[in-house]
Image (cartoon, rainbow, N blue to C red):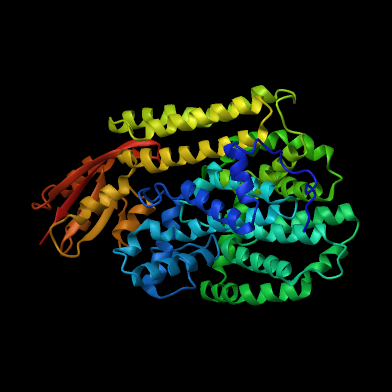
C-alpha cells in the first residue's frame, strides 16, 4: 500500500557514503530489511542476556509462577509459593513454560532455574515488535523510512531492557504494534469495499493474544485510537472493514476458556485481585511506591526512547501542522489519548507507554522525509546536543558504581562505552550539518555500542548486585543431600526461583533458629540486621551450627548495602 510519505522519501546521500549504501541495501527488498533488522536487534538484545541475574521483583515472580506450573502440572492457576498471583492473565506463563519444556528436551542443564530460558519469550516478543514496527510503518511510508523507524525501536533503551526481562511487556509491544498496524491499514484504505483477509486476521489475532498476555491493554490502545478517528470521520462505518462480529466471536472463543476456568477455580478471586486490586489500584493510587505526577512520561521518554526521543520531540510541531493528513491523524490518535490516560493515572512505570513508541518512530521519520526536522528549527542545535547525555552519563556513572560497590573497574566496557559516547557526539555534529537521517543512524550505532558495553561487559562485573545467585550458590554448596532452605530478612523472589518453591521465608530470629532445629540437613540465610536476635534464639539450642560463609552486596530494591550469613545444620 502506498504510504502518505511515498512521494517524499528520506534524503539520499552520496552513493559512496556508508549510510547511503546501508539504506540502499535494505530498501531493495523486504527480506533484506528484515535480515538487517534482526541482526541489529540481536546486537541490541543478546549481550548480557544470560549473565544478567534475575531482576527483582517482577521478573522472578513471573518465572517462579511458571516454574510452579511445571512442578504441579496445573497450567490454569497462577501462584507464587502458596499465594495466588492474580495480577496478569496466563499468556506469558504458557510461553515461558513452553520455553522451559523445550530447553529441558534439548538437554539444557537446570533449565527450570536458568532465568535466560524464561526470558526467551521476551526476546522473541522484542524481535517480533521490531519487525512488526517495520510492517506497520509501511502503511505510511516506503521501505527506507520503515527500516529507520523499526531500527529506532530496536535500539531504544526501554526495549533493550524489556527484551532481557521475563515479563509481559516485550510481547505486549508486539501484539500492540501488530494490532495498530492492521488498524492503520484499514483506516488508510477505508474506501475499499472489502479489506484484505490477512489484515483483518492480524488485527484479531493480535487482540486475542494481547488479552491473554496483559488483559485489556491492547483493547485500550486500539479502542481509544478507533474512537478518536470515528469522531474525526463522523462515522463508525470504516470499522466494518474489520468484520467486527466475526472478529469478536473469534476473540471470545480464544480467551473465554481460560478466563472462565480461572474464575471457577479461584472462586472469583482472580477478577477481584486482577481487576479490583491491581488494575483499579493503579488508577486510584500510586501502587507499590510507583507514584509519579502528571508529566512523568514527557520527561522519562528522553531516556526510555533514546536515541529516538529527541527527533520525536522535534516532530511534534510537524504532527500539529499536518494533523489533517489521514496518516498523521492516525498516529496522533495512536499516541495522544492513551498518553494522557497514563499521565493521569497515579501509578507510573517507564515501560507503560512503550507501545506508543512505534507511532513516535513513524512520525519522526515522516517529519525527516518532509524536510521538517533540522538544525534550523528553534533550539534544535542545543536540544539535539542532549543526544550524548545518556551515553556520556552511563560511561561516567557505571565505572563509579563498580568501583564504589566492588572496588573494580569494568575495563573491557570502558572503551566500548566511550566509543558510544563519541558516536552520540558525532550524531550531534552531523545533525548540525543538516544530515538528519545520518545523525539518526549514528544515534542507533551509539545505542548498539552502549548496550554491548553496559549489558554485555559492565554488568557482569557488578557482583555486588548479584545477591541471589551468590547466596543460592553458597547455600547449595552445603555438603549434604537435599537440604531444606530458609531465609530471614532477605525476601527477594529471585531467591525462591533459584533455591526452590519450598524456600521458607521466616519472620524472626526465633523462627530461623527453630527451622535449623528441625530434622535433616538445613540451611538458613540470615540478614545481619537480624543476626543478634538469631544468635540469641539459637544459643543453647543448637550446638552444631556451621557457617558456610558470608555474602556482602547491594540490594537494589531496598537501596542499601547488605551483609548476610549462611548457616547450616546437618544431622
Residue 407 percent across, percent down from the top left:
28, 30
Is 163 displayed left or right of 189 in the figure?
A: left
Question: In front here: 216 or 25?
Answer: 25
Assign the N terminus to one quadrant of the image. bottom right
Residue 163 percent across, percent down from the top left:
49, 52
Is 314 displayed left or right of 228 in the figure?
A: left
Question: In front here: 411 or 144?
Answer: 144
Looking at the image, residue 363 lies above or below residue 502: above
Residue at x-position 78% and y-position 71%:
244
Assign the C terminus to one quadrant of the image. bottom left
Looking at the image, residue 414 lies above or below residue 270: above
Residue 302 percent across, percent down from the top left:
60, 35
Q: Can residue 496 be seen in this view?
A: yes
Residue 105 percent across, percent down from the top left:
35, 72
The image quadrant of residue 408 is: top left
Q: Is residue 219 visible?
A: no
Looking at the image, residue 253 lies above or below residue 489: below
Looking at the image, residue 312 lies above or below residue 351: above
Residue at x-position 36% and y-position 40%:
457
Which residue is at the far front? 16
> For the image shown, how many numbered marks are present on the structure?
0
Residue at x-position 85% and y-position 62%:
190
Amino acid at each position: 500500500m502506498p504510504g502518505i510519505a511515498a512521494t517524499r522519501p528520506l534524503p539520499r546521500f552520496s552513493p559512496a557514503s556508508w549510510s547511503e549504501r546501508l539504506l540502499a541495501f535494505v530498501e531493495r527488498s523486504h527480506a533484506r530489511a528484515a535480515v538487517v533488522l534482526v541482526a541489529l536487534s540481536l546486537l541490541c538484545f543478546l549481550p548480557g542476556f544470560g549473565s544478567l541475574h534475575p531482576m527483582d521483583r517482577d521478573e522472578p515472580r513471573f518465572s517462579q509462577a511458571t516454574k510452579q506450573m511445571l512442578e504441579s502440572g496445573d497450567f490454569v492457576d497462577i501462584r507464587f509459593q502458596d499465594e495466588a498471583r492474580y495480577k496478569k492473565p496466563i499468556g506469558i506463563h504458557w510461553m515461558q513454560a513452553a520455553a522451559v519444556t523445550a530447553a529441558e528436551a534439548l538437554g539444557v542443564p537446570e533449565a527450570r532455574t536458568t532465568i535466560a530460558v524464561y526470558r526467551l519469550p521476551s526476546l522473541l516478543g522484542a524481535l517480533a515488535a521490531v519487525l512488526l514496527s517495520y510492517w506497520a510503518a509501511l502503511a505510511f511510508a516506503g521501505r527506507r523510512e520503515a527500516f529507520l523507524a523499526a531500527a529506532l525501536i530496536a535500539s531504544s533503551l526501554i526495549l533493550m531492557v524489556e527484551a532481557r526481562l521475563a515479563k509481559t511487556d516485550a510481547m505486549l509491544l508486539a501484539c500492540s504494534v501488530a494490532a495498530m498496524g492492521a488498524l492503520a491499514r484499514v483506516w488508510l484504505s477505508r474506501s475499499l469495499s472489502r479489506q484484505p483477509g490477512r489484515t483483518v486476521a492480524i488485527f484479531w489475532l493480535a487482540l486475542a493474544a494481547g488479552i491473554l498476555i496483559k488483559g485489556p491493554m491492547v483493547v485500550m490502545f486500539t479502542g481509544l485510537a478507533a474512537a478518536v478517528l470515528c469522531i474525526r470521520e463522523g462515522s463508525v462505518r470504516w470499522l466494518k472493514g474489520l468484520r467486527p462480529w466475526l472478529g469478536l466471536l473469534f476473540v471470545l472463543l480464544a480467551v473465554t476458556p481460560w478466563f472462565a476456568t480461572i474464575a471457577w477455580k479461584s472462586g472469583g478471586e482472580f477478577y477481584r485481585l486482577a481487576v479490583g486490586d491491581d488494575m483499579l489500584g493503579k488508577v486510584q493510587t500510586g501502587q507499590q511506591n510507583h507514584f509519579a505526577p502528571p508529566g512523568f512520561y514527557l520527561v522519562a521518554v528522553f531516556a526510555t526512547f533514546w536515541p529516538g526521543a529527541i527527533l520525536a520531540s522535534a516532530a511534534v510541531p510537524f504532527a500539529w501542522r499536518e494533523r489533517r493528513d489521514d496518516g498523521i491523524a492516525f498516529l496522533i490518535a495512536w499516541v495522544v489519548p492513551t498518553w494522557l490516560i497514563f499521565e493521569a493515572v497515579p501509578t507510573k512505570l517507564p515501560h507503560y507507554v512503550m507501545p506508543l513508541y512505534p507511532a513516535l518512530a513513524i512520525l519522526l521519520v515522516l517529519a525527516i522525509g518532509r524536510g521538517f526536522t533540522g538544525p534550523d528549527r528553534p533550539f534544535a542545535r542545543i536540544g539535539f546536543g542532549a543526544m550524548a547525555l545518556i551515553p556520556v552519563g552511563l560511561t561516567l556513572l557505571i565505572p563509579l558504581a563498580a568501583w564504589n560497590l566492588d572496588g573494580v573497574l569494568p575495563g573491557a566496557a570502558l572503551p566500548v562505552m566511550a566509543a558510544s559516547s563519541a558516536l552520540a557526539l558525532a550524531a550531534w555534529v552531523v545533525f548540525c550539518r543538516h544530515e538528519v537521517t545520518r545523525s539518526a543512524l549514528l544515534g542507533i550505532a551509539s545505542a548498539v555500542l552502549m548496550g554491548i558495553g553496559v549489558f554485555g561487559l559492565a554488568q557482569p562485573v557488578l557482583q555486588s548486585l548479584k545477591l541471589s545467585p551468590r547466596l543460592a550458590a553458597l547455600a547449595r554448596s552445603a555438603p549434604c543431600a537435599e537440604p531444606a532452605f530458609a531465609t530471614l530478612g532477605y525476601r527477594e523472589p529471585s531467591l525462591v526461583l533459584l533455591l526452590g518453591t519450598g524456600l521458607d521465608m521466616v519472620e524472626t530470629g526465633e523462627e530461623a533458629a527453630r527451622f535449623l532445629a528441625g530434622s535433616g540437613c538445613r540451611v538458613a540465610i540470615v540478614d545481619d540486621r537480624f543476626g543478634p536476635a538469631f544468635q540469641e534464639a539459637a544459643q543453647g539450642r543448637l550446638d552444631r551450627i556451621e557457617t558456610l560463609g558470608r555474602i556482602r552486596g547491594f540490594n537494589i530494591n531496598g537501596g542499601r548495602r547488605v551483609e548476610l550469613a549462611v548457616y547450616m545444620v546437618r544431622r
